[in-house]
Image: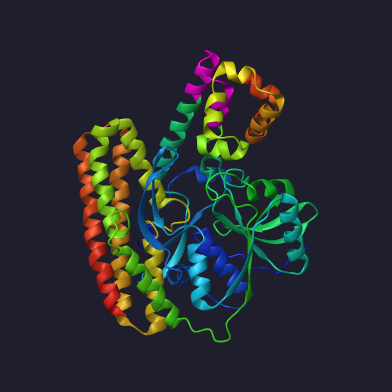
Amino acid sequence: MKKSDVPQDKSNLESAHFRELCYAVDENGEYTTENSTGWTPKTIALDNAIQDIKERTENARKRAEQGLTSPIEYFMELNKMDLGILTSYVGFFRWQVKRHFKPNVFKKLSDKKLQKYADAFNITVEELKTMKYED
Amino acid sequence: MKIDFTHHQSAHCENGVVSNLMKYNGFNVSEPMVFGIGSGLLFCYIPFLMVNHAPAITYRTMPGQIFKKFATRVGVKIKKEKFKTPKAAQERLDENLKRNNPVGLQVGVFNLSYFPDEYRFHFNAHNMVVYGKEGDTYLVSDPVMESVTTLTDKELEKVRFAKGAFAPKGHLYYPIAFPETFDLAPTIKKGIKDTCRTMLAPVPIVGVKGIRHVAKLIRKWPQKKGIKVANHYLGQVVRMQEEIGTGGGGFRYIFAAFLQEASKELQNEKLKELSKEMTQIGDLWRDFAIDASRIYKNRSSKPDAYNQVANQLETLADMEEVFFKKLKKAL
């Protein structure tokens, strides 16, 4: 890649005011570095991944409202977590977390256990129960 | 309290922290040099591991490996510590800062407040240097950022004790002893040989064989997983290749920059030519990313399009196979 070809496309980096560093060759064929504001092919890939997470979150929210799953699954998706990551934050086994996804089991969870989930999601127990929270 | 530490932006965090800490200690080692001597280049498909609900593919060695190999080869001794409690981790950090010693930290990205939201995933092998503390605020040199930044003690505790794969557990590190003679030539050769060996390894998921393996998977994805999932998987391949930290082209450009620097250090003209060749290979990886993005942009496409990008990967595998065989002989 030539230095002049380092892409300067619009991307999500803008919001944080930073440009990433790329390696490229100058007119004399010497390697140098150049900052890039972003590159469309990867911005699309990232946007799609974010869209996918949004869909998963929305889906979990609907199912939680319909009583098909507990708010834990919703907040797990909202925090871009999967079962493995959530498990390591709360310190339960996988099967326990899966069980806590069941609305009936969730209702009977002790405050101590709920607190662990709330801490993992950075919210209060009340917010966890009601699924209402302030970002 | 602020240590006189110079921040240099780098493409990749691990190389960057090593390069910056070396420069602070009076050894001028560039980022590509760290990457090459530490044998950072790779291609590996990791079966059974899913990242963000898609198969894991990496263009670099395991987190920490570049640093480890670089330090062993050059002869730098590194002190590494992990902690059971956040309190102990913070105390040790503060002690070091009081002694005027900037330290490297391994952190999770998800709670890194200065990163753009879209980039905050549960990735726990990010690296930064802390070079001072003012009140409750730590002065941070994050090598992928253009300039220095800060984190409050609460924020820093969160990222140092992120959970999940590669949980940092407060991991803190810094060099404690340097070699008397600093001769890079033999270490460059070791680094190159090691990279050639892994890239040509007779393992189906590693190196050029790994690239062919992924090409085969891509052909199967649309029928086996459906277009939506296939696109998601393909997007992840491109993201791993081009994400912040790769320097573009799945680390191939950084490696080409290393070969160019190495050719001067070893006075080996062949390496200079090979550097040009690696740049061309990097350009082809970029072309692959462009064509792949055309597929997942539309969120629907013909199976034939997948075969085409798979062909591109197979061409890349062939080229890299020839390349690394030549590189091995060029030393």
- Colour treatment of the image: rainbow
Instruction: Say if B295 sits above or below B330 in the image.
Output: above
B21 vs A8, left or right, is right
Percent x, y for residue B44? 36, 54
Q: Is residue A68 magenta?
A: yes
Instruction: Say if B57 sits above or below B146 in the image.
Output: above
Instruction: Say if B112 sits above or below A127 in the image.
Output: below
Please report the residue visible at 45 percent of the width from the left and 72 percent of the height from the top: B37
Percent x, y for residue B237? 36, 46
Location of the C terminus of chain A by quadrant is top right
Residue at the farthest top position: A66
Whether residue B212 can be seen here: yes
Q: Nearer the viewer, residue B154 or A118?
A: A118
Residue at the farthest bottom position: B181
Residue A47 image-quadrant placement:
top left
Location of the N terminus of chain A by quadrant is bottom left
B245 vs A121, left or right, is left
B77 vs B279, left or right, is right
Whether residue B261 can be seen here: no
Q: Is residue B35 magenta?
A: no
Q: Nearer the viewer, residue B123 or A3?
A: B123
Please report the residue visible at 31 percent of the width from the left and 55 percent of the height from the top: B285
Residue A109 image-quadrant placement:
top right
Residue numbers of the magenta segment? A58-77
Q: Nearer the viewer, residue B99 or A33?
A: B99
Q: Nearer the viewer, residue B106 or A16?
A: B106
- Our reading of the magenta stretch's main secondary structure is helix
Instruction: Say if B264 sits above or below B131 in the image.
Output: below
Percent x, y for residue B11? 49, 60
Percent x, y for residue A32? 44, 68
